[in-house]
Image (cartoon, rainbow, N blue to C red):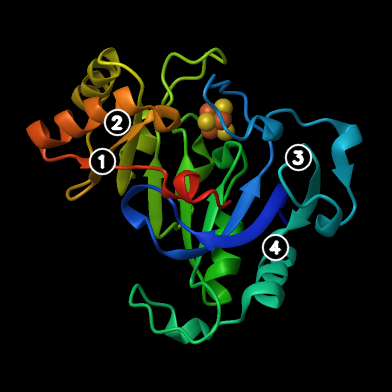
Amino acid sequence: MSQTYLVNDIYASVQGEGAMTGVPMALLRLHGCPVGCPFCDTKETWLVRDEDERARIADALGANSLYAVMSAAQISEYIATKYGRHNPEERTHIITRQSGPLWVLITGGEPGLQPLGELVHVLHAAGYQAAVETSGTADGVLEAGLDWVCVSPKMGMPGGRLVLPEVVAIADELKMVIGKESDFARLEQLLAASSLKPGAVISLQPVSQSPAATRLCMDKALQTGWRLSVQVHKYLNIK
Ligand code: SF4
């Protein structure tokens, strides 16, 4: 039997944060997360409850606790039908598309709780590029063939999950949420204990659009050459 996935939501938008800001994407929000970040803006994805399962994704869409169980083929077909098909032979980092987003961003919840290899394979066969946004605390992102891995490490959270060094090691981007000065020390400890890919981008993201945290991140970016990531979608009030 093929792998199935718990899908909370699928919609199209432009990436609002990090190194891929501005890139049009189909967002695939997988359901379930045990990390428990207090600042989480998708808390409705945390709990997997039987009563929240729906037979069709159309009945689960939106920012709510509902989810549908879908195969990789069903997910890919839903995205292609709703947002446009692509020629697999044209799959490329250079945006030359005529129809719909080239990228599918797999996010959550914590998408790494579910093994992503089969999903990425099917998305590639349909002509999409696959990116993931993960807390780094689950290994389903490993050996999945992803085209872009953003690890937003969540350390010391109430769920007690640990950031896995092997996930940090495949990151194309390490995006750290910063609320206070001591968060830089956590980031530096993680960097000291990890080996990052050559060329990996380090982004500093102020928590919840806090002006004080934004100032901290800007100052740090100027000292280090790391990037500032602001959540553009929050400022634009778009999903
Ligand atoms: S890891 Fe992501 S989805 Fe999970 S609690 Fe933290 S911010 Fe929310």
> Residue 228 shows which numbered tag?
1
- Asked if residue 198 is positioned above or below residue 224 in the image, the reply reads below
Judge from the rendering whether residue 192 lies leftward or rightward of residue 90; answer left or right.
Answer: left
Amino acid type at circle 2 is: Thr
Q: Is residue 148 left or right of residue 88?
A: left
Q: Which residue is label 4 attached to?
A: 75
Q: Amino acid at mark 4?
A: Ile
Identify the mark nearer the N-term, 3 or 1: 3
Whether pointer 2 and pointer 4 mark residues with C-beta atoms closer than 8 Å, the reply is no
N-terminal of the two: label 2 or label 1? 2
Q: Measure the alpha-carbon separation of dots 3 and 1.
A: 30 Å
| Residue placed under numbered mark 2 in the picture | 214
| Marks 4 and 3, how far apart at CA | 19 Å
Q: Which residue is label 3 attached to?
A: 64
Label pair 2/1, CB-CB below 8 angstroms: yes
- Kindly state the secondary structure of the residue where label 2 is placed: helix
**Label 1 is placed on what type of residue?**
Leu
Of circles 2 and 1, the one toward us is 2
- Residue drawn at x 63%, y 30% as measured from the top left: 33
Classify the position of ligand 1 by quadrant: top left, top right, bottom left or bottom right.
Answer: top right
